[in-house]
Image: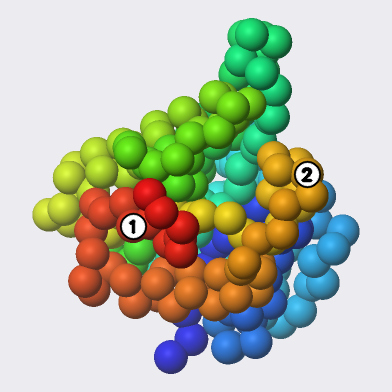
């Protein structure tokens, strides 16, 4: 059965792979990104140039899909920002820019779309193993990993707040995936998983995972701890 998905950070990496997989499976996809030049518009793929940190940008998108009478089955909050810099060299502006995208923008988009999300639907936040308590931590990622820790806690809180009404909220904490962002974080490192491979897993979980999980932060990584 065809579903309607909203996917952020859809112009490259995991987000781009998700758009391609979901549309190939016959689903309607609203592909959100600041730069949508890489996303081809089709009868199933609807690219929207949106900055999730800008209120007017979000409102413009919501106005459009409300006019179209769209009900969302799955929101995949995949957009993310990263900075790799020793903590002593970071600035308040560095932290604000990362948190603005990774947590404030995510929360803002989720909040404004909630009235349009199917009560049996799923809000899936793409997090990181770096934000999971007890996992391996890496120098230079203080802003990024701590913001993903905030995403994880927000996911748990929203699941609790909406447990009686829906939708469900979960997060997948990803390990290393071969993307442009990984190259930025760990230059020269070769991840064991491609964007396409992890996107296959994410799409299936986004469409089915709420039947079995709510308020869970699920590690998706072959590494230990």
Judged from this view, the residue extending furthest toward the left is: 164
Is 148 placed left or right of 133 in the picture? right
Closer to the chain start, of discs 2 and 1, is 2
Against 211, residue 154 (above or below) is: above
- Residue 105, image quadrant: top right
Which residue does the numbered mark 1 point to in the structure image?
218
Q: Residue at x 66, y 35 (%)?
A: 82
The reply to whether residue 105 is visible in this rendering is: no
Mark 2 to mark 1 CA distance (whole Å)? 26 Å
Identify the element where label 1 is drawn.
strand
Is 117 placed left or right of 16 in the picture? left
Q: Position of residue 59 (x, y in %)?
A: 58, 41
Which residue does the numbered mark 2 point to in the structure image?
187
Is 96 placed left or right of 71 in the picture? right
Q: Nearer the viewer, mark 2 or mark 1?
A: 2
Closer-to-camera residue (177/24): 177
Q: Residue at x 46, y 58 (%)?
A: 223
Closer-to-camera residue (196/100): 196
Quadrant where the N terminus sits is: bottom left
Classed neighbour count for the residue bearing mark 2: other residues with Cα under 10 Å, few (<14), some (14–19), many (≥20): few
Against 86, residue 24 (above or below) is: below
Judged from this view, the residue extending furthest toward the front is: 224
The reply to whether residue 168 is visible in this rendering is: yes
Q: Residue at x 61, y 48 (%)?
A: 79
Is 66 placed left or right of 150 in the picture? right
Judged from this view, the residue extending furthest toward the right is: 37
Classed neighbour count for the residue bearing mark 1: other residues with Cα under 10 Å, few (<14), some (14–19), many (≥20): some
- Residue 219, image quadrant: bottom left
Identify the element where label 2 is drawn.
loop
Q: Position of residue 52 (x, y in %)?
A: 61, 39
Q: Residue at x 76, y 79 (%)?
A: 42
Against 41, residue 149 (above or below) is: above
């Amino acid at each position: 059965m065809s579903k309607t998905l909203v996917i952020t950070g859809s112009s490259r990496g995991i987000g781009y792979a998700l758009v391609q997989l979901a549309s190939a499976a016959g689903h309607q996809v609203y592909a959100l990104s600041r730069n949508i030049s890489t996303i081809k518009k089709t009868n199933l793929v609807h690219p929207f140039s949106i900055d999730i940190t800008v209120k007017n940008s979000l409102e413009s998108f919501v106005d459009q899909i409300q006019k179209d009478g769209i009900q969302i089955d799955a929101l995949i909050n995949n957009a993310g920002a990263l900075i790799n810099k020793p903590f002593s060299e970071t600035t308040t502006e560095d932290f604000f820019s990362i948190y603005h995208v990774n947590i404030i923008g995510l929360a803002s988009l989720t909040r404004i779309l909630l009235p349009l999300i199917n009560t049996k639907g799923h809000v899936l936040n793409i997090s990181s193993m770096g934000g999971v308590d007890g996992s391996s931590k890496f120098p230079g990622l203080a802003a990024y990993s701590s913001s993903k820790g905030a995403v994880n806690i927000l996911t748990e809180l929203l699941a609790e707040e909406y447990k009686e009404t829906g939708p469900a909220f979960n997060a997948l904490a990803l390990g290393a995936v071969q993307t442009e962002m990984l190259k930025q974080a760990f230059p020269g490192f070769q991840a064991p998983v491609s964007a396409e491979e992890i996107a296959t897993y994410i799409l299936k979980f986004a469409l089915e995972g709420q039947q079995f999980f709510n308020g869970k932060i699920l590690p998706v990584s072959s590494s230990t701890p």
